[in-house]
Image (cartoon, helix red, strand yellow):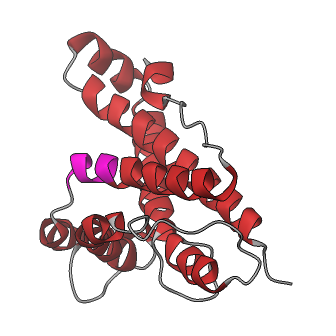
Amino acid sequence: MALSIDEQIYGIGDTISSAQWHFDVWEAIEESRSNPKSVKALNKYIGFFRATGRSLFESYIISCYQLLETRRDTVSFIQLKRELMSAESFDVDIDPNAFASNQLLKPIWQKICKIRNYSVGHMSKEQNIVDIFEGADLKPAEIRTCIEECKKLLNNITYRRNQSRDAFNIRGKDAFK
């Protein structure tokens, strides 16, 4: 049985929250490397923080990938748009500009795809990881943009659908510090 539109919206919101939480904590760990006191603490538990940083990185890459995935059998903004546009039971007009941010997100998502497809989700035999990351040229600010634009997009959809907004106020970075 296929998920309802509301279940898909919930799944997308959960994925956005996961991406934000993991990105925020990863970013806090990375920033702490510039503080000598933090470096001392990080070095004391170096294995833990290396594994944690890698896990958080992979998690937010996969979550951001999922949000804009194009496969028809997945929950993503692309599929949600298709279903909203064709849903006979959809009783609220969709803002024609609701999905305009997809154009802003597309170049970022293509970079995320390179990392996910050749290093995180699969390991390329053709390129080493350094070349993959250099080729993708994905910046942390682009991940932040991806997450923020996805939150705006989902809030636009939910507001027009039932006059509600999702509360995206988790901040992993602050909790980590």
Q: Can you give x and y, in whole percent of width and height, for residue 57 in the image?
A: 40, 51
In the image, is 129 to the left or to the right of 173?
A: left
Please tell me how many numbered marks the rendered image carries: 0
Q: Is residue 138 above or below residue 111?
A: above
Residue 153, can we see it? yes
Residue span colored magenta? 139-145
Q: Is residue 4 above or below residue 172?
A: below
Q: Quadrant of residue 25?
A: top left
In the image, is 39 to the left or to the right of 176?
A: left
Residue 54, can we see it? no
Residue sitting at the far right: 1
Main SS, magenta region, reads helix
Residue under the image location 59 percent in, 56 percent down: 160
> Foreground residue, 45 or 60?
60
Residue under the image location 62 percent in, 80 percent down: 74
Q: Quadrant of residue 9?
A: bottom right
- Which quarter shows the C terminus? top left
In the image, is 168 to the left or to the right of 125?
A: right
Q: Is residue 176 above or below residue 2?
A: above
Q: Quadrant of residue 101?
A: bottom left
Q: Can you give x and y, in whole percent of width and height, for residue 42 in the image?
A: 36, 24
Q: Can you give x and y, in whole percent of width and height, for residue 152 in the image?
A: 44, 50
Q: Is residue 3 above or below residue 18?
A: below
Residue under the image location 41 percent in, 36 percent down: 24
**Residue 50 lies in the magenta stretch:** no
> Foreground residue, 132 or 7?
7
- Which quarter shows the N terminus? bottom right
